[in-house]
Image (cartoon, rainbow, N blue to C red):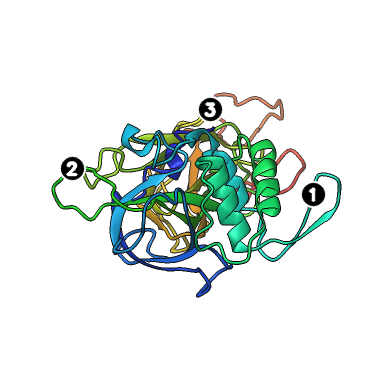
Amino acid sequence: MTDNLQNFSAALPDEVTFTWKAPGNQFGDSSYLDITINSDSTIDGQYDAWCIDSDRSLIGATKGKVFSSYEELPPELIGPGNIEKPENLDSLNWIINQGFVGTELLGENGDNLGTITYGDIQRAIWSILDDVNITLGLGNFSEERAQRIAELALTQGDGFVPGFGQKLAVIITPDETDDGVFNPDKQFIIAEVELSKLGNFVFEDTDADGIQDAGEEGIAGVTVNLLSDVDGDGEIEANEIIDTTTTDANGEYHFTVVAGDYKVQFEQPEGFSEVSPSQQGGNPEVDSDGLISDVVNLAPGEEDLSIDAGFFNNIEPAGLGDFVFEDSNGNGIQDAGESGVDGVLVKLQNPDGSAVTD
């Protein structure tokens, strides 16, 4: 299991309120549940959802704590009646990203096992996380299909990490108490939350105007840090780094993240003495955002590729000049008494003979 990916967890809300309906046929694909999160949070919305363990009821569940399936889960979520096999959560994420429902499933020998239903998916999820044999609420399902899906998930989904536009299994653990003690008392829910993307360009700002002009190339190998409010104090600070990458050969970078609030921090690359002025020209798609960007708020599935940085070298201008004289004896040397000539037009040229215009 690939765990503790902070870009999939740091910006999640601690708690949400929600409503749910079973079976999940109101929106999205057919699923075991439909869940609507309505907490004024970064993941508010409607999602296909599943259950982790059938040992508990969902009746009366309206609020719960929120966790990523790729973070280190608290021990009270692990074990009988909860998540018995957390090492298989990557395989769970693989399942929800296959678009299985409504497709034909082939057996190991190529035989057609029929059309996959939401019940097959839920039964497979229970199988890889809990080993329960309950079939409550599964509707039209096939144990053979469910076990085939579970088998594929455990082999092909081992180490799976979803990318931009794919779904992240967000775990909601209902807890109706207000005693300040974490005591999940209802069925755990998996909500399919689409991942977002943040990027994208570090460039050489040759004219130092803070704008990506035509011909200004990207800078490769620049270190870029992703920041989030790790300590929960309401501020995103420069030391709250949750992920780091470097720009590619074209100067581009990106982070795949769960919906939430972020900043991007750029480290000054070698060979460049200055960072470009920020937010010039009124077009965020082509401006520079400085060494640390403003807060970027991403909704589920949103792509923001406007967070850029320009760098340049502050080179002192050189001088060239300075005297036109009357060479009265024609020897090519400024002799004593040979005076200057005024009003002479002087042009500066490039090595190819073209005029220097700026």
Reading the image, the residue beneath label 1 is 107
In which quadrant of the rendered view does residue 9 lie? top left
**Residue at x 65% of width, y 51% of height:** 146
- Residue 169 at x, y = what percent? 49, 50
| In the depicted structure, whether residue 44 falls above or below residue 202 | below
- Residue 101 at x, y = what percent? 65, 62
- Residue 134 at x, y = what percent? 51, 52
Q: Earlier in the sequence, mark 3 or mark 1?
A: 1
Task: Tell me the SS state at disc 2.
Answer: loop
Find the distance from the CA under tag 3 to the CA under tag 1: 58 Å
Reading the image, the residue beneath label 2 is 181
- Front-most of 164 and 136? 136
Q: Check disc 1 and give the amino acid type.
A: Gly
Reading the image, the residue beneath label 3 is 271
User: Which class describes the residues within 10 Å of circle 2: few (<14), some (14-19), or many (20+)?
Assistant: few
The mark closer to the camera, 2 or 1, is 1
**Residue at x 63% of width, y 54% of height:** 214
| In the depicted structure, whether residue 95 falls above or below residue 128 | below
**Residue at x 50% of width, y 69% of height:** 23
Q: Check disc 2 and give the amino acid type.
A: Val
